[in-house]
Amino acid sequence: MDASPFPAPPAPSVTAAPPVTLAVVGAGSRGSGYAAWAAAHPDRARVVAVAEPREVRRRAFAREHALAEAEVFADWRDLAARGRGDRGRTADAVLVCTLDRMHVEPVLEFAAQGYHILLEKPMALDEEGCRAIVAAVEAAGVVLAVGHVLRYTPYTRALKQVVDSGRLGEIVSVQHLEPVGHWHQAHSFVRGNWRRADEATSMLMAKSCHDLDWLQYVVGRPPARVASFGRLTHFTAANRPEGAADRCLDCAVEPRCAYSAPRLYGERLAQGRHGWPLSVVVDEPTPEALDAALREGPYGRCVYACDNDVVDHQVVAMEFASGATATFTMTGHSEIGDRRTTVFGTRGELRGDGRKLEIHDFLSGRTETLLPQAGAGEMTAESGHGGGDAGLMDAFVAAVAANDPSLVRSGPRESLLSHLAVLAAEEARLSGTVQPVRF
């Protein structure tokens, strides 16, 4: 695992409350990243158990967090069984970071046992699953934080303060762009785990439920109705270059291909950049392991010879009850970068690029530039999701420690609203209709 991106913690206070204990279900990129926050803040949180089916990842995680053998599980059900025994719950809270389609069952079980829960987004893949999760955590009276990390960045906090201050007047419309990036699209949504809707979920749910949630948060209400357009355009057999092989390592076209797997992953290996996305491809960052993965695994396939079916570009149009409108554009045909947003109000306009904000006042004609600053213990734009990963963990741990769900910005009801909007938008795309968002 790479060195922790989180700053060294301050010396713990002798009067501080004991740290919140965490069990991690799923030791992939997300689970390991959240656990790294706990390791960097031992006065506030401590990882005490892990459940992960892949032995190499499970053992590496256990070493990283000095877990005893009795606290390491191959199946989350074995971890949950501990909570039904004489010893009671293993931890105060559980981080559910499994694959998207495997969220509902563990959340229902751990909520029933009284665990507070941090759930990686999306919370579930259909309305039934989302509502079941909300009902379970509310019945149990536990804290639920869904991993909508964009709500927790210093940048979002500053933007939200501007909108809520009234400086822009009444919000009339919003334009929001997510430039996924050409190689990220190829890695995750052509070759990777989220390439097929039937095996994972739609592109909009897997990647961009973040964004519809964020727009709802910024505007201050969910949309009332939505329309959507998008399709898989480029990553198909019809666009396969003449002479291309099924795998990059066998391909004469590979040196001239923007989606070369040996170049994408090999350069990161040579540069010592062993985190995501390379960590998804190989368990051990060695040339031999990478060569084997590209010859035999999914990440060495030609992007024009995969079994992917999710869209590579999509637009969602939204209308809110106030009459305000918003458009969201997701594209995999871009340079990877920060999301870009323009908020149009009756008194001013705000432009944001993920790092800075420009506020233009209609009356004075002046434009002010704001550079959002991270607070103590927060992260800069260079860290995970612009500091959102750290912000989410900070809020969740504080909410558990204080037993105060209001400290979480992405609780069950807020997340249900945004997921229902995503489901309505995808239905609108598939049916070519305008869909109401029914709550």
Image (cartoon, helix red, strand yellow):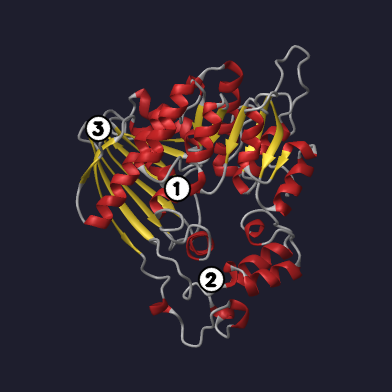
Residue 139 position by quadrant: top left
Q: Position of residue 272 (x, y in %)?
A: 74, 59
SS category of the residue bearing label 3: loop
Q: Earlier in the sequence, mark 1 or mark 3?
A: 1
Nearer to me, 42 or 400: 400
Identified at 27% across, 55% down, the residue is 429
User: Which residue sits furthest bottom?
Assistant: 243
Q: Residue at x 45, y 50 (%)?
A: 206
Mark drawn on residue 232: none
Quote the CA–CA distance across marks 3 and 2: 44 Å
Which quadrant would the C terminus be assigned to in this image?
top left
Disc 2 designates what residue?
259
Indicate which disc, 2 or 1, sits on the residue closer to the N terminus. Answer: 2
Residue neighbourhood size for the residue with mark 3, other residues' Cα within 10 Å, grouped as few (<14), some (14–19), many (≥20):
some
Which residue shows up at 36% across the image and 68% down it?
233
228 sits to left or right of 358: left
Q: Amino acid at mark 3?
A: Thr
Q: Where is mark 3, residue-wise?
A: 346
- Residue 193 image point, x, y percent: 52, 58
Q: Position of residue 234 (x, y in %)?
A: 40, 70
33 relative to 135 in the view: left or right:
right
User: How far apart are the alpha carbons under marks 2 and 1?
Assistant: 22 Å
Distance between mark 1 and mark 3 Cα atoms: 23 Å
The local crowd at label 2, few if under 14, some if 14 to 19, many if 20 or more residues have their Cα within 10 Å, is many
Tell me: residue 436, above or below residue 252: above
Residue at the farthest front position? 85
Residue 107: horizontal and vertical position, in percent? Answer: 51, 35
Q: Which residue is mark 1?
A: 339
Please give left or right for residue 203 compared with residue 173 in the image: right
Query: Sequence-wise, which precedes: disc 3 or disc 2?
Result: 2
Q: Amino acid at mark 2?
A: Tyr
Q: Secondary structure at mark 2?
A: loop
